Image: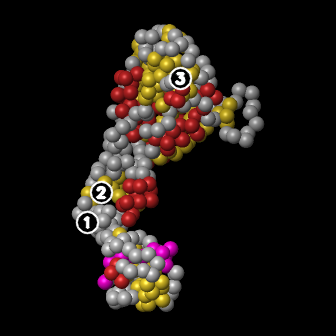
């Protein structure tokens, strides 16, 4: 049964409720090329060495080091070995094989003379500088020995990790799959870009913004826009899509006024609505509908995005297996005074400059409609619920809006 509380819910309590909606995402075998940013679900053990064979580190000539100990010297070029050659004749004493970077070393060779130290000959080569045994040779298993654990479960897969997996022959990796989120933007007043606004209409922005936020967090987003303020149409819009998503994320329709379609649609159906002690972003909802996790955010753009940062992003990243689910934080000094409502945690937009003495400058006012201020901010200034005034120079906690 839906409960609409008249008392304020603390930020931490609502955050815990939202976090509890999503369990760990299932483990899937995903193609290596699709794993960027995902969390590895099991150790990766090399089944082959890296490099898998002795190969040349340079374009040049495979030789016996003893044959070039006294230079200059001319050697007949007995073979030409490009990268990709699967076999080659052994190197006979007193000869050289022209060899390309990455090509397998022929039996009998123990060094490579780089081409710059020769005249580049193709039938006979003059070597002007000698080399020591092992020079310019990459030995088999010099990087990774077969049987070595190269990536641990819990690792976040970036370009280098994926490159290593590919180099070891892995076509797919076990990862926590991305949460699938249906982003729903409600409001009969909303229209799409390129349409001339009629009186009382506004361009829809929350859906675009929240879907982008889901993707930036690592999830998959399906955007469903322009659902009117009608309960039957609301249910008709979401019903066919629920079976394929992990989370339904809505914005708007959760306040105390009339025509609050989200609240009306979910009343008595497993979603609990509350007012959280925060500014912006008070009206919130969370629960399960037909077995699917539901989080409802307020409709004002800044309220919606701040709510996503505080409640939704950490929950998505925890479900994907990230060890760190929160944004980085810092301590900074205010460049200007600010005020905050009593009994509410305030999240003010700010510009943080670590290079000028850890200073943060408030951007815009506290209004939840000031989207332009959010767009040029790089942090949220967090003011505790028991603080109403902060003087310039006061140290505050800032939540950085970029980075893990």
Residue 252, given in percent of the width and then of the height, sits at: 55, 28
Q: Which mark is residue 146?
A: 1
Q: Which mark is residue 360?
A: 3
Residue 168, given in percent of the width and then of the height, sits at: 34, 65
Instruction: Assign the C terminus to one quadrant of the image.
Output: top left
Q: What residue lies at 44% left-to-right and 59% top-to-bottom?
A: 33
The colour mode here is secondary structure
**Foreground residue, 291 or 399?**
399
Q: What residue lies at 51% left-to-right and 24% top-to-bottom?
A: 357
In screen coordinates, is 386 left or right of 364?
left
Q: CA distance from mark 1 to mark 3?
A: 51 Å
Q: Residues within 10 Å of mark 1 (few under 14, many from 20)?
A: some
42 is higher (above) or lower (below) than 92: above
The residue at the far left in this view is 147
Q: CA distance from mark 1 to mark 2?
A: 10 Å
At mark 3, the secondary structure is: strand
Highlighted range, magenta: 108-118
At mark 2, the secondary structure is: strand
Q: Is any atom of residue 67 visible in this view?
A: yes
In screen coordinates, is 148 left or right of 138?
left
- Total numbered circles: 3
| Magenta run includes residue 401 | no
At mark 1, the secondary structure is: loop
Q: What residue lies at 43% left-to-right and 33% top-to-bottom?
A: 327
Q: Residues within 10 Å of mark 3 (few under 14, many from 20)?
A: many
Q: Which mark is residue 347?
A: none
1 is higher (above) or lower (below) than 22: above
In the picture of the structure, the residue carrying the numbered disc 2 is 150
């Amino acid at each position: 049964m839906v409960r609409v509380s008249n008392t304020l819910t603390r930020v931490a309590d609502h955050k815990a409720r939202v976090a509890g909606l999503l369990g760990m995402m299932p483990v899937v075998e995903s193609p290596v090329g699709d794993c960027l940013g995902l969390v590895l679900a099991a150790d990766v053990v090399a089944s082959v060495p890296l490099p898998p064979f002795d190969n040349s580190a340079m374009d040049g000539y495979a030789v016996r080091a003893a044959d070039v100990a006294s230079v200059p010297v001319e050697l007949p070029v007995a073979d030409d070995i490009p990268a990709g050659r699967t076999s080659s004749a052994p190197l006979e004493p007193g000869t050289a094989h022209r060899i390309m970077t990455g090509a397998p070393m022929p039996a009998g060779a123990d060094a490579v003379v780089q081409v710059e130290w020769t005249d580049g000959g193709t039938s006979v080569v003059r070597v002007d500088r000698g080399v020591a045994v092992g020079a310019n040779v990459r030995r088999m298993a010099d990087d990774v020995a077969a049987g070595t654990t190269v990536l641990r479960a819990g690792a976040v897969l970036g370009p280098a990790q994926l490159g290593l997996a590919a180099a070891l022959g892995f076509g797919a990796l076990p990862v926590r799959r991305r949460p699938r989120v249906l982003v729903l933007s409600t409001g009969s007043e909303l229209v799409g870009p390129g349409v001339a606004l009629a009186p009382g209409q506004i361009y829809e922005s929350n859906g675009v913004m929240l879907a982008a936020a889901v993707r930036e967090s690592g999830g998959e987003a399906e955007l469903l826009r322009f659902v009117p303020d009608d309960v039957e149409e609301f249910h008709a819009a979401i019903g066919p899509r629920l079976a394929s998503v992990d989370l339904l994320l809505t914005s708007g329709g959760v306040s105390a006024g009339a025509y609050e379609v989200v609240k009306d649609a979910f009343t008595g159906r497993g979603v609990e609505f509350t007012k959280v002690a925060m500014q912006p972003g008070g009206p919130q909802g969370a629960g399960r509908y037909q077995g699917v996790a539901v989080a409802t955010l307020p409709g004002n753009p800044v309220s919606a995005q701040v709510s996503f940062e505080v409640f939704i992003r950490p929950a998505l990243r925890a479900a994907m297996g990230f060890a760190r689910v929160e944004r980085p934080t810092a301590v900074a000094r205010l460049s200007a005074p600010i005020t905050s409502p009593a009994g509410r945690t305030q999240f003010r937009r700010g510009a943080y400059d670590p290079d000028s003495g850890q200073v943060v400058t408030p951007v815009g006012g506290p209004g939840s409609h000031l989207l332009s201020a959010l767009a040029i901010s790089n942090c949220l200034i967090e003011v505790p619920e028991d603080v109403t005034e902060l003087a310039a120079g006061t140290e505050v906690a800032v939540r950085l809006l970029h980075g893990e």
